[in-house]
Amino acid sequence: MRRACTVLLLLLAAVAARAEDPVRTYAVLYDVRIAPTERAADVSIQLTDPSHWMRWIRFQIDPARHVDFRGNGEIRIEGDSVLWTPPRMGGTLRYTFRIDALRDERSYDARCSENWAIFRGDDLVPPARIRTDDFAKSRSRLRLRLPKGWSSVVPWRRAADGSYAIENPDRNFDRPIGWIAVGRLAVTRETVAGVRLALAGPIGQRVPRLDRLALLRWTLPELRKVLGDRLPERISLVSAGDPMWRGGLSGPRSLFLHASRPLIENDGTSPLLHELMHSTLRLVPADGGDWIVEGLAELYSLELLRRSKTLTRRRFERSLAKLAERGATAAKLEVPHATGDVTARAVTVLHALDGEIRQATKDAASLDDVVARLADLGEPVDGAKLREVSEAVGGTDLERFFTRYAPGALLPRAVIPAQP
Ligand SMILES: [Zn+2]
């Protein structure tokens, strides 16, 4: 009897452990060696999985950049897909990542030179679909092996052993997504509004790190007021001059900005703050929702400047008026990719929406609350979602507003005056 009870207890304990145990994990180490002479990175994905949670991983590769796959277990390459079935307890998959990527005929959005390399971690480890048992999660780390004298700037926490902890709470399989800069780098680090900033560029390239830091010191506290603890713990800003692409590109907790881009354009918008908004909000457009993602980034780049008193209200309004004029040529808002005129029109509409919500709530709520909620939702954004969230925040029916600015319909060509 006593023995039966013990067995029963053990069984119950095992069932309870299985029900409660949230720690169904396997370990992934991305071991990356940068080889500047080959303009490449040798990537080794080492999987440790004693409980055999992982069944397979299917990578969506770029066959021109991810080459020479080898390793143990079964590797099946079909066009732009690589299916890896690792051995039962784990194993290693290796490949070579060609770092250089041309964005247009002459300029690069990823590049490896003799003394530095800048690229996206999302490209280093391509997107993957996985099959695991019982929603097992990865514990992922990245180790960078660099030439002598090189350092790195990445948007992740450094562990005691020198590797980086890769944590994306919204994913089961953590990849090192975000911008990576390695090389002989000049780096400025500072904590602003509770965010650990790292600004980096290749030594000798005259990247204006302190100018940019100054702008962030004025504006990040204002962004903190909008996003609260949604602001990430760290943000890195990597930069280089020609032949890198002369623009700005955002990633999670990180962004790239060409060394020559001004802090603030003469029309009052800021490429740095525009990309910062993308990096921190991380809004993804649903079909036809790009105008919202781009419009919010552009409007808030202006708002942060106004609220930090970097721009006067008069200059802010002049910028809005200029954008309204520019946006008047946009035929409709719901387009696959928001071009300049659509983004400009989006700024006008979103600013008007802010006025509408403030009026409905007697200034108790604003577009800031909509932005924060959209960031929390983590769902693709389109006009319907914007309306739903705006109505919830404003506690009012916004049918009239959304009919007037119907995102899917052709817009009247008239200039909408900016609201004060
Ligand atoms: Zn943008």
Image (cartoon, rainbow, N blue to C red):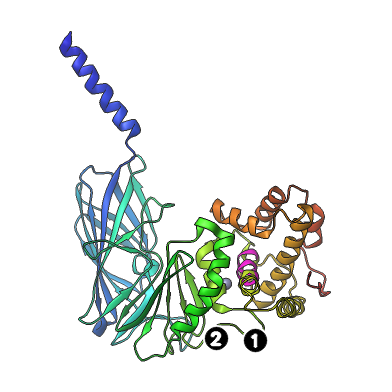
Residue 33 percent coordinates (x, y): 23, 73
Disc 1 crowd rating (10 Å Cα; few below 14, some 14-19, many 20+) is: few
Q: Residue at x 39, y 61 (%)?
A: 127
Side of 250 where 155 appears, left or right: left
Q: Secondary structure at mark 1?
A: loop
Residue 142 percent coordinates (x, y): 28, 63
Quadrant of the rendering where the C terminus is positioned:
bottom right
- Quadrant of residue 218 in the image? bottom right
Quadrant of the rendering where the N terminus is positioned:
top left
Does the numbered disc 1 mark a residue whose Cβ is under 8 Å from ligand 1? Answer: no
Disc 2 crowd rating (10 Å Cα; few below 14, some 14-19, many 20+) is: some
What amino acid is at disc 1? Asn
Magenta residues (range): 292-299
Indicate which quadrant contains ligand 1. bottom right
Closer-to-camera residue (365/394): 365
Decide: is 304 above or below 356: below
Q: Is residue 43 magenta?
A: no
Q: Residue at x 43, y 81 (%)?
A: 239
Residue 244 percent coordinates (x, y): 44, 85
Does the numbered disc 2 mark a residue whose Cβ is under 8 Å from ligand 1? Answer: no
Find the distance from the CA under tag 2 to the CA under tag 1. 9 Å
- Report whether residue 291 is seen: yes
Residue 381: mark:
none
Cβ atoms under marks 2 and 1 closer than 8 Å: no
What amino acid is at disc 2? Pro
- Residue underneath mark 2: 262
- Residue underneath mark 1: 266
Side of 15 where 109 appears, left or right: right
